[in-house]
Image (cartoon, helix red, strand yellow):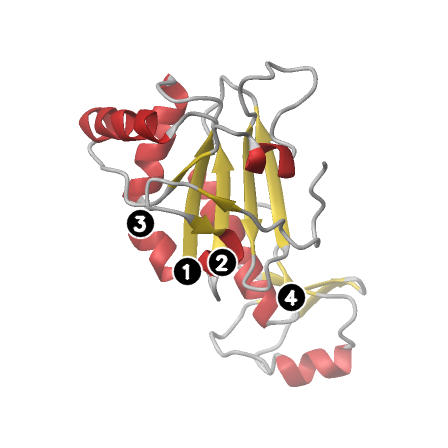
């Protein structure tokens, strides 16, 4: 099946390196990142899993739980984890699903018909506390995923959920943002008393003052 933005992320029960995962229950009120890799003992994904482990303080700061997946069995995950710690300098500190029955992979459309049926594609899903899918990425086998970008998108989503703004091209936390078109100029003056710049009626730029809007 194809996972669409805005739909509820499919729930599942699957074994992992941290025991049985009941996905929605495990997420609780947290944001979630579910990411898949083709198989264990692959070079690009070895570097990625080490990076995800290194970023543990950043995930915690944003109330994000991360969850990896491949179609390899649990004992292979444990052996691979030792390699990741040795080569990347960071031991796994998040669960890896052992989806050897491909239950989750099929649920999330991770086995593509024109690819190897024995491996999953390298996908990323960002899921919000309401269990809605907010972002999907699919990467080619040769290009390592950019987890700095994934963090950036989480920051954007969390900010824009809290305030009536959107984030422009190449935005990073602290940069000016865009007032959404559904907010009138009158309402914008109330919400953003620090003032804003109108480039076009549909393009209004504001520097946030750090205060949450209601």
Q: CB under 8 Å between callouts 1 and 2?
A: yes
Question: Is residue 14 in view from this perspective?
Answer: yes
Tell me the element at label 3.
helix
Q: CA distance from mark 1 to mark 4?
A: 19 Å
Q: Earlier in the sequence, mark 1 or mark 4?
A: 1
- Percent across and percent down for residue 34 are 50, 43
Mark 3 surroundings: few (<14), some (14-19) or many (≥20) residues within 10 A? some
Q: Nearer the viewer, mark 2 or mark 4?
A: 2
Image quadrant where one finds the N terminus: top right
Mark 2 surroundings: few (<14), some (14-19) or many (≥20) residues within 10 A? many
Q: Earlier in the sequence, mark 2 or mark 3?
A: 2
Q: Is residue 160 above or below residue 86?
A: below
Query: 51 and 205: which one is in front?
Result: 51
- List the residue tagged with mark 2: 31
User: Which residue is depicted at the point 39% across and 18% down?
Assistant: 42
- List the residue tagged with mark 4: 165
Image quadrant where one finds the C terminus: bottom right
Q: Going by the image, does 151 lie left or right of 138? A: left
Query: 119 and 162: which one is in front?
Result: 119
Q: Nearer the viewer, mark 1 or mark 2?
A: 2
Mark 1 surroundings: few (<14), some (14-19) or many (≥20) residues within 10 A? some
- Quarter holding residue 80: top left
Identify the mark at residue 62; answer none if there is no mark.
1
- Percent across and percent down for residue 192 are 61, 79
Identify the mark at residue 56; answer none if there is no mark.
3
């Amino acid at each position: 099946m194809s996972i669409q933005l805005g739909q509820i992320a499919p729930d599942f029960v699957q074994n992992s390196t941290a025991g049985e995962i009941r996905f929605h229950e495990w997420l609780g009120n947290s944001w979630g990142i579910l990411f898949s890799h083709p198989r264990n003992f692959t070079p690009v994904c070895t570097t990625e899993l080490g990076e995800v482990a290194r970023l543990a303080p950043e995930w915690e700061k944003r109330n994000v739980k991360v969850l990896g997946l491949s179609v390899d069995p649990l004992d292979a995950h444990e052996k691979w984890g030792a390699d990741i710690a040795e080569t990347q300098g960071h031991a796994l500190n998040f669960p890896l699903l052992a989806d050897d029955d491909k239950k989750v992979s099929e649920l999330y459309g991770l086995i593509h018909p024109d690819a190897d049926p024995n491996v999953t594609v390298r996908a990323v899903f960002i899921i919000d506390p309401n269990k809605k899918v907010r972002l999907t990425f699919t990467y080619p086998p040769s290009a390592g995923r950019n987890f700095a970008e994934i963090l950036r998108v989480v920051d954007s989503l969390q900010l824009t959920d809290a305030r009536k703004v959107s984030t422009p091209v190449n935005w990073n936390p602290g940069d000016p943002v865009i007032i959404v078109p559904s907010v009138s100029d009158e309402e914008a003056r109330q919400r953003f008393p620090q003032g804003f710049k109108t480039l076009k009626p549909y393009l209004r730029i504001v520097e946030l003052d750090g205060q949450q809007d209601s």
